[in-house]
Image: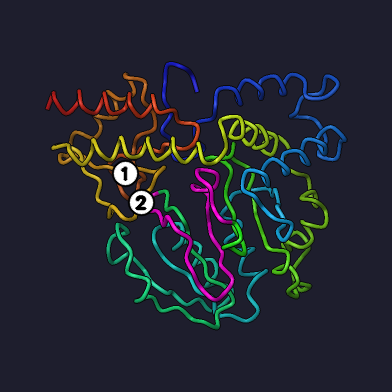
Amino acid sequence: MSENIYNFSAGPATLPNSVIDHLKLAINDFDQGMSILEVSHRSKAFKDFASESESTFRRLLNISNEYEVLFLQGGATHQFTMIPQNLSRNGPVDYLITGGWSKKAASYAQQQIEVNIVSDSSENNYIDLDDQDTWNINSDSDYFYYCANETVHGVEIHNSIKVETPLVCDMSSTLCTRPIEVNDFDLIFAGAQKNLGIAGLTIVIIKKELMKQKTEHLNPIMRYEDHAKDKSMLNTSPVFSWYAAGLVFDWIEEQGGLEVMAQINQKKSQLLYEYIDNSDLYKNPVSKKYRSWVNIPFILKDNTLDPIFLSQAEKFGLYNLKGHRTVGGMRASVYNAMPVEGVEMLITFMKDFENKQ
C-alpha cells in the first residue's frame, strides 16, 4: 500500500509495506538468481522456507502436535466441499447461518449430505443472532460448522462456540487478528487474502484424529490425509502465495504477536464505531454484541450521497469503501495491516463530509 493511500478492501486486502518490499526482492532473486515466481515448490530453498513458515505460524497460535497445518491451493470456498466430504460419515451435520458465507457453505454441504440448520439469522437481516439456547443443535451430528466473521455483513462471533460434536470454523477474516484457543476447535480454515497474505492460498488447521475417518472413496486431491502426508505438496503448491503468508507471519511476530494485534485491532474498530454511533449521518446496523473488529459496514442516512462520498473519499486517498453489492452502503475493512492512522484519516474525512451536508 502506498504511503499516500489507505486500502479498505475486504480482500484481497492491504499488506504491510515491509512485506511488499520483501516480495519485490524475492521476485527479482529468491534463490541463486531465480525469482520466487519461477522456483520449484520442491526446491530445497522453498522447502526450508515452507518449514520455517509453518513453525512461525504454529508458534503464533500455539498449535500443538495434535493438529496438522495445511497450506492448500485455492480459496476458502473450496473447503465448503472438502469439509463435508472428509468429515461427514452419513450426516446429518449442523450449520449455523449468520451471513452470506455460512449460508453458501451450507448450500454446498446440502448437495452432498443432510444439513441441519441450527439457526438462521436471515430473519434479522444478518445483524443479530438468536440466543444459543434457542438453537436446534443435533447432538448426533458429524460436526458443527460456523463462520466466525461474516465479511459482508460485519457480524462476528467473538467467543468460540461450545458443542459436543467436532467444531469446524471458517476464520478467513479472524485468524491472527487476536489470540485464539486452537484446542477448542477440530478444524479451522482461512483464506489468506485478508490477514495472512494474498489470494491463492487457504490454510487449514485440522486435528489429526479427524483424518482417521475412512475417505478412500475420495480422490487423493480431496483428502486432507493425503495433503498432510505430502506436507501440503501433493500437487504444485501456490509458491508465491505461501511465501507472502510466511512473510506476514514474520511481520506479525515482529509487531509483538497476536496480543499486540488484538490491542491494535480493537482500538481501530472502537475508534470507528464510536464516531459512527455519535454521528447524525452514518449508521452501523449490527447488534453491538456481534460487531466485527475488522469489517465495519455503515450506511449514510441519505443513500443518494453514496457515490459522492466514494468519489470524494478517493480524492482523500481512501479506497475500496463501497459496501458489498448485496448490502449496499459502505464498508471499511481494517485488517491487521491497516494502521491506526488509516482509520483516523477515514474518520477525519467522514467528519468533514458530514459537516458539509
Rendered residue at 73%/43% (across/down): 55
- Picture coordinates of residue 210, whole percent (x, y): 69, 69
Q: What element carries label 2?
A: loop
> In the rendered view, does 74 fall on the left or right side of 116?
right
Query: Looking at the image, which residue sits at the far top?
Result: 4
Residue 222 vertical placement versus 44 (above, below): below
Choose between 267 and 189: the one closer to the eye.
267
Q: Which mark sits nearer the N-terminus, 2 or 1?
A: 2
Residue 153 image label? 2
Report the number of numbered marks.
Answer: 2
- Picture coordinates of residue 231, whole percent (x, y): 80, 51
> In the rendered view, does 118 fall on the left or right side of 300?
right
Magenta region, residue range:
152-181
Rendered residue at 30%/39% (across/down): 330
Q: Is residue 167 magenta?
A: yes
Q: Mark 1 points at which residue?
A: 297
Residue 321 vertical placement versus 103 (above, below): above
Rendered residue at 34%/55% (across/down): 290
Choose between 187 and 254: the one closer to the eye.
254
Residue 91: image quadrant is bottom right
Q: Residues within 10 Å of mark 1 (few under 14, many from 20)?
A: many
- Picture coordinates of residue 348, whole percent (x, y): 26, 24
Q: What element carries label 1?
A: strand
Whether tag 2 and tag 1 are in contact, CB under 8 A, the answer is: yes
